[in-house]
Image (cartoon, helix red, strand yellow):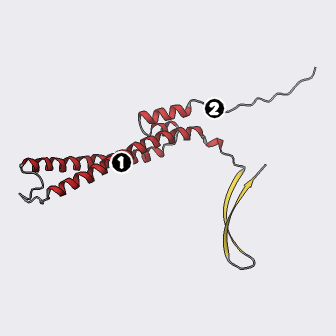
Amino acid sequence: MSKIDTVDVIADEINILAPSKAAFYSAVLPGLGQIYNKKYWKTPIVWAALGTSLYFYINNDHLYHQYRTAYKYRIAGRPDAFDGTGGASFLSEAALERAQKVYRKNRDLSLFVTIGIYILNIVEANVDAHLPDNALNTNITFAPELFVDPVTQAVSYGASLKFKF
């Protein structure tokens, strides 16, 4: 009887639902998909980006409503925050209208940026789950280089791409 040698190969478990889970977690709570992918350092970046864009949205919304209320009071003939009394600066009705337009535009832009960052957070978690660190091919290298041209003695730059088989 002949004995056949066998080699047990342990394949890495591939979780095909990992990208979906990471995207879902990031949709529920921004940054949670990055935590699920074990990229903890990305979570504060996501929170800072969303927090900053939300801050600008809330601030512009507050200023828009402040100038809008002052404009409504001015039209109604009531005292407002910008009527020049009590140490407040005076703004004309045209200036109040322009301020409303500027802050409404900035508020809307801040909202679009916030939504964009939220979507980018979800997409990043999904893509990062698709590309695990051990899937990188180390047989491919890219190296930018500086070299001296032997004829003109000028410094030039170039790049090389190497494949190892």
Provide residue 20's location: percent of width, then percent of height.
Answer: 53, 32
Q: Residues within 10 Å of mark 2 (few under 14, many from 20)?
A: few
Vertical comparison of 50 with 18: above or below: below
* Residue that label 1 marks: 53
Q: Nearer the viewer, residue 18 or 91?
A: 91
User: Is residue 80 toward the left or the right of residue 145 in the image?
Assistant: left
Q: Residue at x 28, y 46 (%)?
A: 58
User: Is residue 76 toward the left or the right of residue 21 in the image?
Assistant: left
Distance of label 1 from label 2 (alpha carbons): 36 Å
Q: Nearer the viewer, residue 132 or 160?
A: 160
The local secondary structure at tag 1 comes to: helix
The local secondary structure at tag 2 comes to: loop
* Residue that label 2 marks: 14
- Upstream in sequence: badge 1 or badge 2: 2
User: Is residue 74 toward the left or the right of residue 8 in the image?
Assistant: left
- Identify residue type, mark 2: Ile
- Identify residue type, mark 1: Ser
The numbered dot on residue 145 is: none
Q: Residue at x 25, y 52 (%)?
A: 101
Provide residue 108's location: percent of width, then percent of height.
Answer: 32, 46
Q: Residue at x 60, y 40 (%)?
A: 132
Q: Residues within 10 Å of mark 1 (few under 14, many from 20)?
A: many
